Image (tube, grey):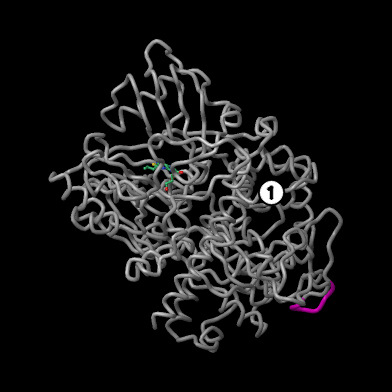
Amino acid sequence: MSNLEIKKKIDKLTSDLNDHNRRYYELDSPIISDTEYDILIRELQDLEAQYPDYKDSNSPTMRVGGRSLNKFGSVEHTVPMLSLANAMNVDELVNFDSQVRRLLGRENIEYIAEPKLDGLAVELIYENGVLTTASTRGDGVLGEDITQNVKTIQSLPLTLKDINNIPSLIELRGEVFIDFDDFTKLNRRQIDKKEKVFSNPRNLAAGSLRQLDPNIVLRRPLKIFCYGLGACKGWDFKTQIQLLETLPNWGIPVNKEIKSGLGVDFLIDYYDKGEQLRDRLPYDIDGVVFKVNSYSDQKKLGERSKSPRWAIAGKLRAQQATTTIENIIISVGRTGALTPVAKLNPVVVGGVTVSNATLHNQDEIDKKDIRLGDTVLIQRAGDVIPEVVKVVKEKRKLGSNKYIIPNECPVCNAGAFRHKGEAVVRCINSSCASQVKGRIEHFVSKSCMDIEGFGPQLIEQLVDQKLIMNISDIYSINKDQLSSLDRMAEKSAENIFNSIKKRKTILLWRFIHGLGIKNVGENTSKVLANHFQLLDNLMIANEEELIEVDEIGEITAKMIILFFSSDNNRQIIKKCIKSGLEFILSRPQKQSLLDQSFVFTGTLTQFSRSEAKKMVETYGGKCINSISAKVSYLVVGKNPGSKLAKAQSFQVSILTEKDFQDLINSQ
Ligand code: IVH
């Protein structure tokens, strides 16, 4: 790049980032994810380091956070409220620890690990035990006076408990946030009142603290956890642990997920569990924070211009990203539901490439006004199918039109209608190829008959060539028919044939679930199998008998009766049984997993962690979180963490996902 180009690049990054800051801090309406922001800021930092002459005096890298607004009075922080440096991966954590060890000239440092709440940083000043001032972080030195608003937080004491045993002055730092439950409830109320819906808990918390009318804030379910200290008189805290253990005695809320430990292994272990922690917590975190425990060590380490050397934030993989909608297609499911799916320009979210997002139904599309070609913020959460959070309207191309789901099935051209009271549009033709394929996919899937190797591509070919029309036909295809299919080697045909055979003796609930009766999921199927013991008993049960069964309601009972009253369905079941299907109520327990312990690492692609846990527990094994010599198996998914090396050093048996499945299936 020429010097001119570099200057242009720095100017562009500066103005873009200032704009993003304004959107984030002042408008509470960001259009890029935090990770994308981090990447941009790092790029600018690198360029400024190489070409200091081109650095803008107003560069966003000079600020700790956003500007403070003028609506409130301002408060000067006697001890600046700093920001945290980020570690994007394990290597950067390892570097952090080596720097700390080098500067302190000691090994095995004691650290504290805390969840990094995604809310708003505040400072609280208690003078002689009384809450006198609360302020936002602002630019780190000057914040806004939000005392009245903070006083509305129910869990925060206006006067410290144990008033005879307190410091004369204490400045506490903490994070104000709103948990998922309260967020959903509040948004539901907003919808009822036909008022603005908040896009996420952080924006709601930030927006609430900035309300000029404390009466409105009073109705916002704000919570706080304190994690840091500013000035303090009349009390001598020696460590972060001491602070966090003392605060609850005074009635100050502190996060319960905080742990302490020694050295880099502790850092890596807590960081590795960060994503699991995020999935489990009832509020949002965007990372984990590691701090050197001893305050005298913290003092020795000191700080850089914006962040201390004694702490670091371990970033978790972003769950959101922006991309564009390249196409909208309609997928037709086994129940005939037409689901609009956005085909995205592929983007990496939380370490996984996402190219599809569900648009749910017409109401959702209308609510978010999603159109072809739009730039959208997408989000993935755990195992849930990615979805569109919002459209970045500023980037919408001219001439786009509202999207409307067609009233004709795109697969069989039959009519597609939306019934009263339903959110979905359905294809009315039950022999529609998509519905047939969907029903078969469901029948052979892991949570039903679990026929290995019987995947969607195979089903597609078999249905298109009319070799199978319904589930019973699976049992009449022969090896020759299978090997005549495209890309099907003889060996694979044989494998599939054998896996069909292997599942001919099957738990009754699996078959019931596989039938795809509306409202009858895995759990209900188990309840039904348990209660009726024989398929025949279930098939002839009347409404009263069904309702008598625990957990079966009137609607489910009606669905079951409707299903078995169809001649066609009864014929299909009869044919399955004639082909040799046999139902059993429980498997003879080999119990080889009894008391065996399992640890998981990396991203599982075949099943979720909770499914894996259930499988292990079903056969008497247990799941634990960390590796020790006592662990029986480590199951390794994609991008495994440090547990793999640790397990190898302890000579723990290592299983791929496939090995794990084989082990479970042999039970
Ligand atoms: S320590 C100098 N601990 O993260 C130490 N910060 O990027 C700075 N945050 O402004 C703060 N949870 O808003 C610390 N347990 C925690 C935190 C935490 C969330 C936020 C806070 C801070 C930002 C730093």
Spot occupied by residue 45 in the image (x, y as percentages of width and height): 38, 64
- Classify residue 373 as left or right of residue 323: right
Q: Nearer the viewer, residue 66 or 446?
A: 66
* Residue 578 occupies quadrant: bottom right
Residue 504 in sight here: yes
Q: Which residues are magenta?
A: 410-415
* Residue 379 occupies quadrant: bottom right
Q: Nearer the viewer, residue 607 or 568?
A: 607
Is 186 magenta? The answer is no
Instruction: Report how many numbered discs are placed on residues in the image.
Output: 1
Spot occupied by residue 535 in the image (x, y as percentages of width and height): 65, 53
- Please, what is the three-letter code of the amino acid marked with disc 1? Asn
- Classify residue 182 as left or right of residue 647: right
In the depicted structure, whether residue 582 falls above or below residue 398: above
Image point (64%, 73%), residue name: 325
Asked which secondary structure carries label 1, the reply is helix
In the depicted structure, whether residue 249 falls above or below residue 397: above
Q: Which residue is mark 1?
A: 537
* Residue 73 occupies quadrant: top right
Is 414 magenta? The answer is yes
Image point (55%, 60%), residue name: 20
Q: Residue furthest right?
A: 420
Q: Residue furthest left?
A: 105
